[in-house]
Structure formats: C-alpha cells, structure tokens
Amino acid sequence: MTGIQLGGIKVGPVIGAATDPNFVPAGAPIGQIGSDPGDPDDPWSAAAPPGGVIVQTPGPSAGPNATGTLRVPVPKNVPTGPRRVAIQAGHWKSDETPDELRRLIPQTGAEWEGVTEVEINLDVAQRIGVILNSKGIVVDILPTTIPVGYVADAFVALHADSDGVGVNSGFKMAHGARRGPYEDALLNDIKDSFGAATRLEYDGTHITSAMRGYFAFNWSRYQHALAAHTPAVILEMGYLSNDDDRALMLDKPDVLASAIADGVLKFLNDTPRSKIFGQDLVVPAFPSRPSRQSPSP
Ligand SMILES: [Zn+2]
C-alpha cells in the first residue's frame, strides 16, 4: 500500500495501525463494493474512513465465500473532558453540503399544511441542547453536513416523516451496520423514554433502508460521516402528515426534547467513554471489487 502518498499518513516507528501492511489511508479505495442490503441498486466503491482502515482478508482455509473483515482503529480525536453529544437537525442547511453529499441538496424534508420538518427538527434539537448543557454535557447541533470523521459519545439525527396521505402515526428508529456495538443500547434507551413520554406508537413496520443506510452512518462511502465508533441513531419523531402527531410536535416540543435527552442521559450513564472507544472495531468486509484484483504495485 502506498499510504504515504495517498493520505499523508506518517508511518513512524510507533507500532500502530498505520504500520500494518494492510492499512488503507483515509479516502483511498479498499477494493470492495459497498451496498445496503435493502438497496442493492445503489452500490458504491468503499473507501477508507478518515482514520484509515485495515483490510483483513480471509485465510486460505476460510472458504470461497468468505469476505474477510475491516478493522477500524480507535479514533485519534476521542474527546476528553465532558461527555459530548451531537444532535443533528435533519435537512437543516441541506443546500450547504459538500460535493460528495450533493445528492442531498434537493432533499429538503417533509412538509404538510405549511409546516416543514426542518423547523421542527431544529426546534427540538436546540431544546435538547439546552437540557443536556444544563447537565454538563457538550452538545453540537449539527446541520446536514457531518464534520469529517465526527467523534462523540452519542449522535442522534432528528427527522419527521410524511406518508403523503395522513394515515400513518408513530415514531421510528434505526441505526447503521458495520458500526460500534453500543447502538442498540442507544436506540432502546431513546425508544423507551420517547415512547413513554409522547405515548406515540413505535412504528416498526415502516423503517426504511434509507434510515438504516443513513448517509451519516456510512463511513465507507462518505468522508463527511460519523466515525464508526460514534454510537449513532436516527429518530423519525412522528408523521407531520398525521394531525395528532403534527400537533404533538408543534405544541409540545419540550416533551419530545426532554424524552430524547432522558434517553441519551441513560445511555451515557450506562456506557462510559472508555468502553465506547476502548478498542478497534472489527466489522465484516464488503464483497471485493472484481475488476481490481491485481496486487498493489
Ligand atoms: Zn427527514
């Protein structure tokens, strides 16, 4: 691997990820095709995330269908001091995305009877920020664009939905694949507190591949994505298109915000930073890219 040229990574005398012969530096292709299980028609050329990745190919005894693993090193910029949480206001400033995310520019979010999703997302996000700040937690309110390789103790993307006809009601949640092991816990903590406080039903039947494959989770496709270690979920808080859901989101944003904050606080209490960032992540590789099987120069 020509790591020095591609990523400016310094390969020093220290034993570490960058000295591994299979280390691929930030942004360089890893010779694999990424795809979401629910959306196989939209594959991408998987690339190393900002901290690089180690491609571990299966041994000869692993069988013809084995694809190996990817080892994602612990981020170098793990925060110190207070816990740090990001709340993303879905679709906020979607027109300011970088080139790699330009397909998101026209995705301005749901709208119903003059109410836009983004105004609700931003309002609730800011209220969550106030609550968490009062508990000594540092909060980043993020727009559509995620800082490159963003690292935090938790990330929640806020959205509101529309079914186009006004029938569906309830909230939905998802997290990505090939990420850290604490995302189920974050999801369940928020799901419990949000469901109890809002009395909305959990709409498990309409969770989409677009939620599971949310761009912010997708570190093998975008540099402007969350570090794989950052525990991350997306929350569709309700349906703008439903009269009751919309009234709740418009009239009781503090109820939503404190419920989400409670879930985040429970997660942080149960999950120390030393566990979240304690070790490299090992996740399944993607299928290899057939046309690029030639060995490295
Ligand atoms: Zn949305």
Image (cartoon, grey):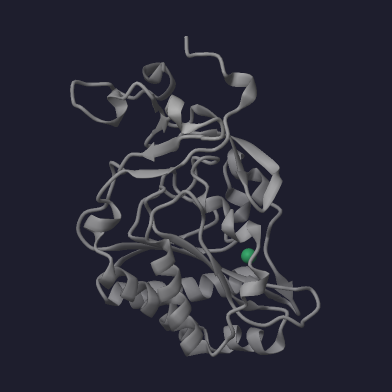
**Quarter occupied by residue 189:** bottom left
Q: Residue at x 33, y 25 (%)?
A: 9
The answer to whether residue 236 shows anywhere in this view is no
Camera-side residue: 209 or 12?
Answer: 209
Q: Position of residue 285 (x, y in %)?
A: 49, 38
Where is ligand 1, by quadrant? bottom right
Question: In the displayed image of the protein, which residue is found farthest to the right?
Answer: 165
**Residue 70, placed above or below residue 194:** above
The N terminus lies in which quarter of the figure?
A: top left
**Quarter occupied by residue 249:** bottom right
Q: Position of residue 39 (x, y in %)?
A: 69, 50
Q: Position of residue 203 (x, y in %)?
A: 62, 77
**Left or right of residue 180: residue 80:** left
**Residue 109, placed above or below residue 9:** below
The answer to whether residue 230 shows anywhere in this view is yes
* Count of picture labels: 0
**Residue 248, placed above or below residue 11:** below
Q: Residue at x 31, y 27 (%)?
A: 18
**Residue 144, placed above or below residue 284:** below
Q: Residue at x 71, y 88 (%)?
A: 243
**Quarter occupied by residue 31:** top right
**Left or right of residue 90: residue 7:** left
Camera-side residue: 178 or 253?
Answer: 178
Q: Residue at x 51, y 52 (%)?
A: 177
Question: In the displayed image of the protein, which residue is found farthest to the top?
Answer: 297
Camera-side residue: 223 or 220?
Answer: 220
